[in-house]
Image (cartoon, rainbow, N blue to C red):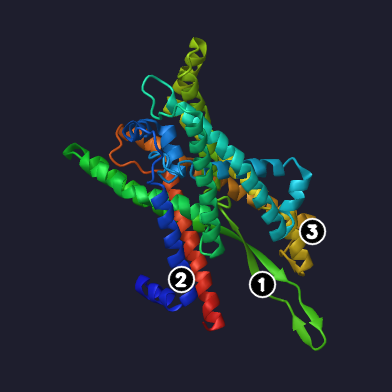
Amino acid sequence: MNFVGKFKQIWRIRPLRNSILFIFFILAIFRIGSHIPMPGVDLVALKDLFARNQMLGMLNLLTGGAMSTFSVVALGLGPYITASIIIQLLTMVIPALEELSHEGQAGYQKMENYTRFLTVPLAFLQAYSIIKLFSQGSSPIISLTHSFDIFSTILVMTAGTMFLVWLGDLITERKIGNGVSLLIFAGIVDALPLTLQKAVVSFTAAQVVDWLVLSILAVVTIATVALIARAQRNIPVTYARQIRGNKMYGGMDTYLPLKVNQAGMIPIIFAISIVMFPSLIGQFMSRSGTVWLAKMGKNLMSVFQNQTIYGLIYFFLVVAFTYFYTAIIFHPEQIAENLQKQGAFIPGLRPGQPTSKFLHGISKRIMFTGALFLGLIAILPIIVQGVFKTTPFVVGGAAVLIVVSVVLETLDQIDAQITMYEYEGI
């Protein structure tokens, strides 16, 4: 079905149409909030700082551009993502949390509540750190002198993060895409016109070849991301025949899909959240009045400004988080147990432990490909800059992955909604 036909089909289903319009309304509220600046901020100096610092640019990516304007939602969903990382790490070492992760929807809801509770102090701490960082130096970007002004600003920034978490929940409840992912997606897409405008303004005749090569690379990158996002290994599964009375049940052949990239875009978001901290700490230390502390901060910044070192650390973190997150969400023992309970088996394998080992081995092999893919996508801008020695139009691998993944996930959920409504005759 072509795009026009799909759009007409969506528009005819009133509940689906209303849900999509509601999501656009929520995204519009988010974008309006990201352009309401806090008082006492030199916006020109702030935008110039973000343009010159790659780490801060990555932080700005997660906030949907709200950080570069120091808006009421300047922290974006960063504290919530950090809280999610901490809770998932604790799941590996605290038995009570591990049990919750296996309790289905009820356990998931409790862990979500823990994540939200942890988000509040993290947002408060991050807001305070950013205000202190930007308030130092001979020409501070943020000019807040009174304690009440600082406290009220921190309070507003924390409330802004929780407001975005609430907006994300409203979107997720509509079952058309993940709310947090869609908010990050909206920020990236909103920044595209300005990025293209800057690229066009800086274009020169000498860059024709570079532009042509980079444009082809952009198309290939998008196609590869979409291909890997859809790629999966189908494990054949057979349901045993069961005779009940005069009727026969089962005997059906199907398959168990294992995605090459089971972790999605989460490892890159995790890696960005971690890799930006040393640079931020270095900037904070470099503005200190203590000579040795300022020198240590400058040395730390110089290490992470080295593109080779930064790229290697970023690549390693993405690969490591891919294995870590996949281990959290993929449980071969539980899958093998469920197959056995349903009277299903993988041809040639006994149910139970042999099936679990087989699934674990398959997962490790395809996970290696997925981890390498995510790592290369993450450092793609660094490779492009190193090869072309210029950035007329840099293909942001992380941004492309987030955009393509969110679009594919949202389209899949819309198709599922269409199928459901057609089945119900709505």
Residue at 40 percent across and 73 percent down: it is 6
Q: Residues within 10 Å of mark 1 (few under 14, many from 20)?
A: some
Q: Is residue 105 left or right of residue 377?
A: right
Residue 238 place in picture, x, y as percent: 70, 70
User: SS for tag 1?
Assistant: strand
Q: Residue at label 2?
A: 18
Q: Is residue 230 visible?
A: yes
Q: Is residue 90 above or below residue 164?
A: above
Find the distance from the CA under tag 2 to the CA under tag 1. 38 Å
Q: Is residue 213 left or right of residue 264?
A: left
Find the distance from the CA under tag 2 to the CA under tag 3. 45 Å
Q: Residues within 10 Å of mark 2 (few under 14, many from 20)?
A: some
Question: Nearest the camera: 157 or 380?
Answer: 157
User: Quadrant location of residue 239?
Assistant: bottom right
User: SS for tag 3?
Assistant: loop
* Circle 2: residue type: Asn
Q: Residue at label 3?
A: 352
* Circle 3: residue type: Gly
Find the distance from the CA under tag 3 to the CA under tag 1. 19 Å
* Circle 1: residue type: Asp
Question: Nearest the camera: 121 or 264?
Answer: 121
Q: Residues within 10 Å of mark 3 (few under 14, many from 20)?
A: some
